C-alpha cells in the first residue's frame, strides 16, 4: 500500500480517509480536513526551511468560525486529527524517524491552528467588549435624553399652571 518510492507527504496523504474518518466518496466539509491537509502540505514542503504561516489553514479556521463553529469545536477537531494520525502512522509507517517527523510536523500544525484560534477568540472578545461598551453608552445617553425630556415637560407644565 505505501511504497518506499513515495515521499512522506504522499504516504501520509494515503491515510487521509482513515484519519478523517471519511466514508467512501468522502466530503471536503468533514471536520478537520483543513488541519490534515496542512499537515500534508507541511510534510510535502519539508525541504522548505521557511516554515511560515499557512494561509490556507488560517482561512479555513476563519471560515469555520464565521459559519458558527466554536473555538472549542475546532480545537477538539485538531486534537482528534492528531490522535488518529498518531495511531495510523504507528501502524502504517515502518521507520521510526518517519513516524517522529510526522508527529512533530502534526504537533507544529496543530499548535499553529491553536494559535490562530486563540487570536480569533481574543479578537472576538475585544469586539464583544467594544460592542458592550457602545451599548452601555447608548443606554446612558437614552437615560439622559429621557431625563431631559422629563425636566422639560415638568417645566412646561409648571409654566401653564400660572
Image: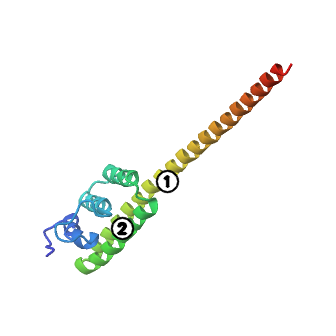
Residue 33 spot, x, y in % from top left: 29, 62
In the rendered view, does 41 fall on the left or right side of 126?
left
Q: Can residue 147 be seen in this view?
A: yes
Q: Give the Cα distance between marks 2 and 1.
A: 25 Å
- Identify the residue shown where x is 70% and y is 33%: 146
Q: Mark 2 points at which residue?
A: 104
Q: Can you tell which quarter of the image residue 83 is in?
A: bottom left
Q: Residue 121 carries which label?
A: 1
27 versus 54 height, above or below:
below
Say few, some or many: other residues with alpha carbon within 10 Å of mark 2 (under 14 / 14 to 19 / 20 or more): few
Looking at this view, is 57 or 156 the one in front?
156
Say few, some or many: other residues with alpha carbon within 10 Å of mark 1 (under 14 / 14 to 19 / 20 or more): some
Which of the image's four quarters has the C terminus?
A: top right
- Identify the residue shown where x is 32% and y is 64%: 31
First reached walking from the N terminus: tag 2 or tag 1: 2
Q: Which residue lies furthest to the right in this view?
A: 162
Amino acid at each position: 500500500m505505501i511504497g518506499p518510492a513515495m515521499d512522506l507527504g504522499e504516504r501520509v496523504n494515503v491515510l487521509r480517509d482513515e484519519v478523517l474518518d471519511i466514508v467512501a466518496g468522502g466530503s471536503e466539509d468533514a471536520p478537520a480536513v483543513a488541519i490534515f491537509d496542512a499537515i500534508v502540505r507541511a510534510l510535502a514542503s519539508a525541504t522548505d526551511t521557511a516554515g511560515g504561516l499557512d494561509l490556507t489553514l488560517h482561512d479555513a479556521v476563519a471560515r469555520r468560525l464565521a459559519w458558527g463553529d466554536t473555538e472549542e469545536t475546532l480545537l477538539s477537531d485538531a486534537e482528534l486529527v492528531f490522535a488518529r494520525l498518531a495511531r495510523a502512522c504507528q501502524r502504517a509507517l515502518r521507520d521510526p524517524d518517519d513516524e517522529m517527523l510526522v508527529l512533530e510536523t502534526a504537533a507544529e500544525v496543530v499548535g499553529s491552528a491553536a494559535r490562530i484560534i486563540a487570536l480569533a477568540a481574543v479578537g472576538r472578545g475585544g469586539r464583544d467588549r467594544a460592542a458592550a461598551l457602545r451599548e452601555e453608552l447608548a443606554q446612558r445617553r437614552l437615560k439622559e435624553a429621557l431625563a431631559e425630556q422629563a425636566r422639560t415637560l415638568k417645566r412646561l407644565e409648571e409654566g401653564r399652571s400660572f
